Amino acid sequence: MKLLLTVPILARPERLDRFLARNFPGTPREYWRNNLEAKTRINGRKAVKGALLRGGETLELAETPSEAGPSLIPNREIPLHILYQDRHLLAVDKPAGPPCHPLREGETQTLANAVVARFPQQAELTPRREAGLVHRLDNETSGAILFARDAETLQSLRASSQSGAMRKIYLARVEGRLQGEGRIDFPIAHHPKSSKKMVVARNSAEAKKLSARSAETEYQVLSSEGESSLVRVEIKTGRRHQIRVHLASLGHPLLGDKLYGATQASSRLHLHASEIILLHPHSGEELSIHSPTPRRI
């Protein structure tokens, strides 16, 4: 069924995809990435993802987005290494390779499929295909990742993750001999010519043009060997590809990250979510959840 929306007057211009994601919080973000241009019109004209809304526009959606989404198919054949669990939250160790959750109906080879096979009640959380997923890791990133086990905890943990109150520490191996420590605070935006990439804005004019969002990454070089360096990274925000694009902006892309300019051959993306530090949303206790360091990172 078609849906017509009138955009309210906005305090400042907002990208169409962000407006829709904000107004349909139960709909997976991938729905808009995959369907926005084909299923949305602005004032009768075909929409584009980067379109800016100012208020007063009429949006026509070809269908009413599903708030819950398709159900997950349990898959017990996928190993699940649990780092921490209680009745409110679950932390698991994600291997490099599998996606966090399905992007299409019928997919079964994801971490969320493994979670609902052991914890069937996770399938009732919305969006259903995320099984209570609090935050995401790229497919080729390994390490600690959180799932909430009830709706209240999910809301609380996602707010903590997005605000920066939840600390996320990574180990990354980058190309070249990076030295010392520092902070990168370039805002991050979707690449204007590639839906697969993000890009940093190096000044305020560029940030405004690209509708870039603030991002902060702290790094400390732990060691160097040959033509690579092992780096401890902590992010204060959680933008898409944040660590990858920030380190690449220094001229030191992650080893194996061809998307952001890596030239050395590698079989994987060298990024590992090493530790998550958070306050338990119910007890207030500080939790430090560690993922074992891979033999080669």
Image (cartoon, grey):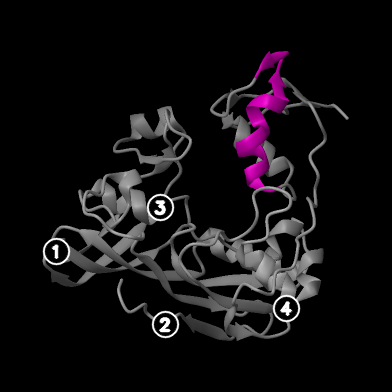
Inspect the image, locate mark 1, and give the three-letter code of the amino acid beneath it: Gln
Of badges 4 and 2, the one in the foreground is 4
Disc 4 on helix, strand or loop? helix
Label 2 crowding class (10 Å Cα cut-off): few <14, some 14-19, many 20+? Answer: few
Inspect the image, locate mark 4, and give the three-letter code of the amino acid beneath it: Arg
Please give left or right for residue 251 compared with residue 166 in the image.
Answer: left
User: Mark 4 vs mark 3: which is more N-terminal?
Assistant: 4
Reading the image, the residue beneath label 3 is 242
Label 3 crowding class (10 Å Cα cut-off): few <14, some 14-19, many 20+? Answer: many
Reading the image, the residue beneath label 1 is 179
Disc 2 on helix, strand or loop? loop
**3D distance between C-alphas at marks 2 and 3:** 22 Å
Inspect the image, locate mark 2, and give the three-letter code of the amino acid beneath it: Pro
- The question of residue 132 being in magenta is answered with no
Disc number at residue 292? 2
Disc number at residue 118? 4
57 lies above or below 12:
above
**3D distance between C-alphas at marks 1 and 3:** 20 Å
Magenta residues (range): 28-46
Q: Quadrant of residue 7?
A: top right
